[in-house]
Every structure is written in C-alpha cells, then in structure tokens.
Image (tube, grey):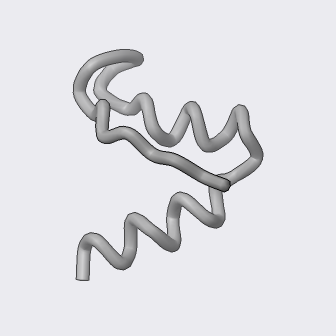
C-alpha cells in the first residue's frame, strides 16, 4: 500500500516527495501518479 501526503514546499528545498519516493524505491509509481495529476 502506498499512501501519499501532499507536503510539497515544506522540507528539502520544496522537493520532499521525490526524496521520499527515492528512499522507498517508488520513483516510477510516484511519477505515474504525478503524471495523472498533471493531465
């Protein structure tokens, strides 16, 4: 299960989610969700 909280702009030079995804080895999954949100 993957749960994402929108905390952009809070930590690590406004890029918290990509850092978290990298730590959890979920970059591809996060990017797929991000692309859906952009469209």
Residue 26, relative to residue 35: is it above or below? Answer: above
* Drawn side of residue 23 relative to residue 9, left or right: right
Residue 3, relative to residue 33: is it above or below? Answer: above
Horizontal and vertical percent for residue 36?
35, 78
Residue 31, relative to residue 39: is it above or below? Answer: above
- The structure residue drawn at horizontal position 40% and vertical position 17%, both measured from the top left corner, is 12
Q: How many marks?
A: 0
Horizontal and vertical percent for residue 14?
29, 27
- The structure residue drawn at horizontal position 56% and vertical position 32%, both measured from the top left corner, is 19
- The structure residue drawn at horizontal position 43% and vertical position 29%, both measured from the top left corner, is 16
Q: Quadrant of residue 8?
A: top left
Give whichever of 32, 1 is nearer the camera: 1
Looking at the image, which residue sits at the far bottom?
Answer: 39
* Drawn side of residue 16 relative to residue 2, left or right: left
Residue 28, relative to residue 4: is it above or below? Answer: below
Q: Quadrant of the N terminus?
A: bottom right
* Drawn side of residue 16 relative to residue 22, left or right: left
- The structure residue drawn at horizontal position 61% and vertical position 64%, both measured from the top left corner, is 29
Horizontal and vertical percent for residue 32?
51, 73
* Drawn side of residue 4 relative to residue 38, left or right: right
Horizontal and vertical percent for residue 39?
24, 83
Looking at the image, which residue sits at the far front?
Answer: 1
């Amino acid at each position: 299960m993957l749960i994402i909280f929108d905390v952009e702009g809070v930590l690590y030079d406004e890029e918290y989610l990509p850092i978290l995804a990298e730590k959890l080895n979920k970059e591809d999954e996060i990017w797929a969700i991000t692309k859906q949100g952009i469209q």
